[in-house]
Image (spheres, rainbow, N blue to C red):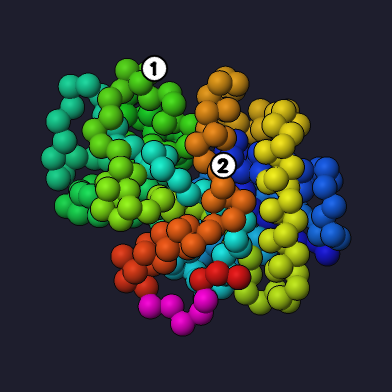
Amino acid sequence: MKMTLGISPCPNDTFIFDALLHQKIDTEGIEFDVFFADVKALNQMALKGKLDVTKLSFHAFTRCVTKYVLLDSGSALGKKCGPLLITKPDTVLCNSSKIAIPGKYTTANFLLNIAKPDYSNKKEIIFSKIEDEVLSGNFDAGLIIHENRFTYQQKGLKKVQDLGELWEKTTKLPIPLGGIVVKRSLPFEIKKTVERVLRNSIIYALKNRNSSLDFVKTHAQEMNSNIINSHIDLYVNNYSVSLTQNGRKAVMLLFDKAQIQQTESIFL
C-alpha cells in the first residue's frame, strides 16, 4: 500500500525513517511518497489532514486529534532536550520584545506561552533562520529547536531560558516535543503495520548507527558530524522506540494543559 508521509529534514527524523524508506527492513507492503518540510509546514498540513502519516508537534496534535492518532513509535520526548529562548548578549527582554518562533503550533511555542504568557509580539519564521535573524537585529530574541541547540553559542548568542527545564521541574515527566501520527480513517491493521515497521526501522537505525549517515547528511541543516550525532542522541531514545507509560503521561498532560477535551483516544 502506498501512503503519503511528511517528515522534517532534521537528523532525528531521517535517522529513524531511513531503514523503512530504503527497504533495509521488511516494510510489509508499505510504501511512502515522502514530503520533506519544516515543522511549521508539517503542523499546518496536519491541521488540514493532508497526509496519511506525518511528524507533527504535540501542540499541533491537540488541534487535529480528531483526524489523527498517535503511533507508539517515532516520538521525540526526553530530558534536557527542550526549546531554548536565546538573545544577543546585551539584549534585555520585555513583554513587547519581538520574538522569532518556529511556528504557532509548535510545542516550543506552547512552552513559551506557559513560561512567558505576556510575550505577545511573536512572529513565525523557519526554524533554521532564527539564529541569523536574531544576530541581524531583526528580532530581539529567538525560540530555537533542533540542531540550533548545538550552534547558538558558537554564533555568540546567549541562552535566556531553557523552557524544557521548566516543564521537567514542574511535571517530573519527559518533554513531549513531537510524534508520528496516522490518519484515523485508515483501516486499523494498516495503522498497526505502519507502527510496527516504523519501530523496526528505529531499532535497525540504533543497531546500525552509520547506515543512515548519507541520507541524514543529505537533508541536514548542519553538516558537522558531531552536531548530527549529538542531535540524534538527544532526540532518539527509548521513548522513540515505545512511548511507555511515562511518555503517555507526558502527552496526556500536554493535552490537559492545552485544555483540550478529546473524545477520541490519543493513542493507537
Most foreground residue, 20 or 242: 242
Give the residue type that dot 2 points to. Answer: Val
Query: Residue 205 location in percent, x, y?
Result: 70, 39
Q: Look at 82% across and 55% down and name the residue there.
A: 27
Crowding near the residue tagged with mark 1, few <14, some 14–19, many ≥20 C-alpha atoms within 10 Å: few
Give the main secondary structure of the magenta stretch. loop
For the C terminus, the quadrant is: bottom right
N-terminal-most mark, 1 or 2: 1
Q: Which residues are magenta?
A: 261-265
Most foreground residue, 192 or 93: 192
Which mark is in front, 1 or 2? 2
Query: Residue 235 location in percent, x, y?
Result: 52, 41
Give the side of residue 231 with respect to residue 35, left or right: left
Query: Residue 187 location in percent, x, y?
Result: 73, 76
Label of residue 154 in the image: 1
Q: Is residue 122 visible?
A: no
* Residue 191 belongs to the span the image colors magenta: no
Q: Look at 37% across and 48% down and name the residue there.
A: 108
Crowding near the residue tagged with mark 2, few <14, some 14–19, many ≥20 C-alpha atoms within 10 Å: many
The residue beneath circle 2 is: 236
Q: Is residue 265 visible?
A: yes
Secondary element under disc 1, as helix, strand or loop, is loop
Give the residue type that dot 1 points to. Answer: Gln
* Relative height, residue 130 to residue 184 (above, below): above
Q: Look at 54% across and 51% down and name the residue there.
A: 239
Give the side of residue 219 with respect to residue 159, left or right: right
Q: CA distance from mark 1 to mark 2?
A: 24 Å
Query: Residue 242 location in percent, x, y?
Result: 59, 56
